[in-house]
Image (cartoon, rainbow, N blue to C red):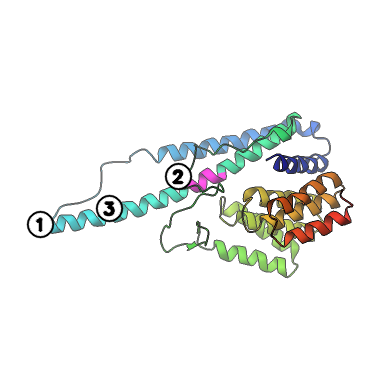
Amino acid sequence: MSNLRQILLASALIAVSAIPGVAQDREQTLADIRQELTVLHVEVQRLNRELSTTGAPSASLAGSSVLDRVTAIEAELQRLTAKTEQLQHRVQSIVKDGTNRIGDLEFRLVELEGGDLSKLGETTTLGGDVEGETDTGQATLPATGGESSALPGGGELAVGEEADYKLAMSDLEAENYQAAADRFANFKLAYPGSPLTAKVDFGLGKAQDGLGDTREAARSYLAAFTGDTAGAIAPEALFELGAALGRLGQTDQACITLAEVAVRFPNDPAVTAAEAERSKLACS
């Protein structure tokens, strides 16, 4: 955890150097944060309303025989089960997105107030622990029907979600960096809490690197790593974050971050790249 805090501290250096005159913009930025908290509050209230009934039960369980009534009950149970799974998926998506936003707000508030970023811990899950959450902190989402596609590690993709991601990746591979950056940014707005968020943040970082915006790329790599610290993209995201810090002149933080790649992912190919980058930076 101490190493992760050092990585977060490195991201603070990026943020501080990126915003000249933070004190002058303090009131406006705090107002933005208050606005985001209001949005989160509204989302929580909308979830509370899901617990209120809207009228009398509409199920009809009548029948001329016991078999007819049993069949009607079975059909109603299937309908309610499907509806419950859909609502559970929606609630877990909102919880994940809300938790990420609160964590970002906590970071920004401490940064603005001049607090110690190394003291920040893991953000408490919005609403408490999520049922079905795994040891890696990623919720395993239930299947909701044929309108979405399943991921190997659990979770569901909305209609068009995978297609939008592939379009953004196509632009990135074709070195259409501005188009790719726009597509990745729009993806995050359209699909908050998506299982692909870490990959999208990483792709956004690559596009920003291609545009020469190293500072924003470092922020995106940090988001990709912290969004799923045990995911497939995590080793490469951590390496790219360290390399970006080195290009920004934050050599000490870059060396710490790059060393963390071998500590966390000793058998990953990213270790070789990280060690090569440490040699280039003359890390001790």
| Residue type at the position of mark 1 | Ser
Q: In x, y percent, where is residue 23?
A: 80, 31
Determine the main secondary structure of the stretch shown in magenta. helix
Secondary structure, mark 3, is helix
Which one is closest to the eye, mark 1 or mark 2?
A: 2
- Residue 235 circle label: none
Instruction: Determine whether the residue tagged by mark 2 lies in a helix, strand or loop.
Output: loop
Q: Is there a contact, CB below 8 Å, between mark 3 and mark 2?
A: no
Residue at 14% across / 58% down in the picture? 67
Q: Name the residue under label 1.
A: 65
Residue 71 pos. (x, y %):
19, 58
Q: Nearer the viewer, residue 45 or 172?
A: 172
Q: What stretch is highlighted in magenta?
A: 91-97
Which residue is rendered at x = 79% and y = 44% of the image?
Answer: 14
For the residues labelled 1 and 2, the Cα–Cα distance comes to: 39 Å
Question: What is the distance, in whole Å, between disc 3 and disc 2 at their CAs?
Answer: 21 Å
Label at residue 131: 2
* Residue in the image at 76% along x and 52% along y: 241
**Rendered position, 113 above or below 179:** above
Horizontal relation, residue 98 to residue 280: left or right: left
Residue 176 is left or right of residue 145, and the answer is right
Earlier in the chain: of badge 1 and badge 2, it is 1
Residue 21 lies in what quarter of the image? Answer: top right
Q: Name the residue under label 3.
A: 77
**In the figure, is residue 62 to the left or right of 225?**
left
User: Considering only vertical position in the picture, is 1 above or below 166?
Assistant: above
